[in-house]
Image (cartoon, rainbow, N blue to C red):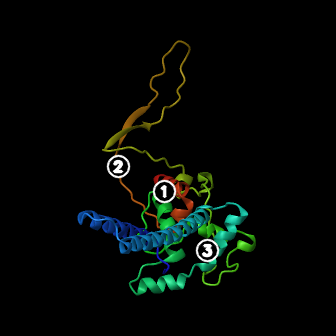
Amino acid sequence: MTDLPIKDLQALRSQYVDQREDVKKSAELEERDLSDTDVAEMERLASEIRKVDVQLKVKREDAKIAESAVLAGEGSRSEQREMARMNKRFDLAGAVRDLSQGKRVTGVAAEYTEEAMREARGSNMNIKGQLSIPASAMRALGDAGEFGAGAGLTNSPGFVGTNVTAGVAALAAPTLFESMGGRVLNGLTSNVNVPIVTAAATIASAAEGANVSSAASAVGARNLTPTRYGAFVTVTEQLMMQGGPAVEQLITNDMITQ
């Protein structure tokens, strides 16, 4: 039996089961007992079903091992070794060649791409490409030691994992406007009159019991017309996937501040 994917094996098993049912139904419609030929055919189909079941069991076990390796991140030593074996089997050039020829990626490349898409959906992102590498695989490639970048990788480039931590706003350089003591009024939606002192109060002296003639203080108003400013920032999907909400929040706060 050729090496078929799980979906095709399930379809083949269903086909054999239907054929066995057809043999029994044929005898029932003809109102006769099962002949020796019918029994032999049913035994042959049962043997084929058992072979498919064995293939399905092996395929499902392989899928569980691959999934645990991809999702492990920083799992046990055995899982890291399994990840290393998968990285050795990962043929990036071959996957790119298949895509350029209009084919679909298969093997480790397909498993990596599916996991990368799940990671992206977890960060409220969508990956449009047909080939991607999950952050868990890149972290494993970037770890120190025997699983470090480029260690034992025959078909893969030496990736370096990027673990982005939460940003510290206090470390951001203040703008020139902020350095000069400028203040920003947020939330204005229309013109506004802001009261200001147009003439500062003066100090005058008077004899005991007398009134000061005038402090010469005046309060006026300054009309402000709100001005809208826009800002944009360019980031890579790799940064957003590896940094997650921490990077997104840092960029959002920075744009609001600026």
Q: Amino acid at mark 3?
A: Met
Q: Does residue 168 appear to the left or right of 16 in the view shown?
A: right
Q: For the residues labelled 3 and 1, say whether their Cβ atoms are less than 8 Å apart.
A: no
Residue annotated with mark 3: 86
Mark closest to the chain's N terminus, 3 or 1: 3
Residue found at the far right of this picture: 145
Whether the residues at callouts 1 and 2 have beta carbons within 8 Å, the answer is: no
Q: Nearer the viewer, mark 1 or mark 2?
A: 1
> Circle 1: is it few (<14), some (14-19), or many (20+) Cα within 10 Å?
few
Amino acid type at image mark 1: Gly
Q: CA distance from mark 1 to mark 2?
A: 38 Å
From the viewer's perspective, tell me whether residue 103 is left or right of residue 76: left
Identify the secondary structure beneath mark 3. helix
- Tell me the residue that label 1 is attached to: 122
Q: Secondary structure at mark 1?
A: helix
Choose the circle earlier in sequence order: 1 or 2. 1
> Which of these two is toward me, 159 or 202?
159
Task: Please provide percent x and percent y for residue 42.
Answer: 40, 70
Q: Residue at x 33, y 48 (%)?
A: 225
Of residues 96 and 229, the one nearer the viewer is 96
Q: Which residue is mark 2?
A: 226
